[in-house]
Amino acid sequence: MIKQLTDTLNFQTQALVLRSERQRLIASNIANADTPGYKARDMDFSRALKEATGNLGASSGMATTQAGHISPPAGARSDAQMLYGAPSQTNLDNNSVDMDRERASFADNSIKYEATLRFINGSVRTMLDSMKSHNAS
Amino acid sequence: MSMFQIFKVSGSAVSAQSQRLNVVASNLANVDTVAGPDGQAYKARQVMFQTEMMGATGAPGDPAAAGVRVSTITEDQTPGRRIHDPKNPQADAEGYVTYSNVNAVEEMVNMISASRSYQNNIEVMNTAKSLLLKTLQMGQG
């Protein structure tokens, strides 16, 4: 029974963790806007969320059949699966950060982070409300 | 938590941009200096940026926390302007005075770009700070 109570909360918690990771990624892009040769990264948020909540199995990492095999992390959060931002204007110094797009993504991600916080607060408040006894007296 | 690393990343960017502003200020201050007795005028300086991974310890190559640092400060090797002015006490044998090779217009553009980046990173830090403060108040109605 506890599981049903905390299922919604679990989903929102995963979303919060992934939002903060994406925030960090965008902040790194903005910090490196002037570095020659830097390539802007982004993550596929919906896919990462599906993997984290178990609705989509993590895409197959490498099979390890021998003891000496290394298994790098798989899934949308790993380095191999992170996407690259397509450069909209070419640069002499091969920097692919588009400041306007990064600023827009940063604002978008911040709003969604706050929205997730509000949903969590709402769920917590609902649970607390349902635990109060409403004796009419 | 990932959001705390934003302070490290944006802090490194702010520090790198302020070093860049420092260099611009030095260049602009030395626009009109002439060559000293060794014959070498002031050479314009430029900073070179480099990405520096700031992942949490134990997570090598974490791609999400990429800060920036100044790797070197290079000097521009183009020869300085030479003005013909025999009356100047610093004139050489042919009457030419060598000034620095600073291009004031380039330096102003550099300064504008550096200050925009600086402001952007300050804003990133402010937003991260307010989001974290709101996260701390989670569940408190």
Image (cartoon, rainbow, N blue to C red):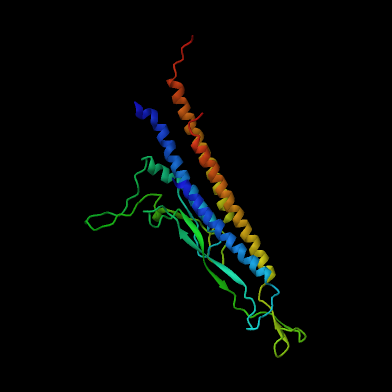
Work out whether residue A109 can be spotted. yes
Closer-to-camera residue (B37/A106): B37
Q: Residue at x 64, y 76 (%)?
A: B42
Whole-percent x, y for residue B8 in the image: 49, 52
Q: Quadrant of the N terminus of chain A?
A: top left
- Residue closest to the far right: B87
Closer-to-camera residue (A70/B136): B136
Compared across the picture, whether B91 is left or right of A34 comes to right
Whole-percent x, y for residue A16 in the image: 46, 40
Q: Residue at x 73, y 88 (%)?
A: B95
Above or below, comparing residue B127 to residue A117 in the picture: below
Work out whether residue A26 can be spotted. no
Among the 4 quarters of the image, the one containing residue A68: bottom left
Whole-percent x, y for residue A57 in the image: 34, 44
Among the 4 quarters of the image, the one containing residue B103: bottom right
Whole-percent x, y for residue B85 in the image: 76, 84
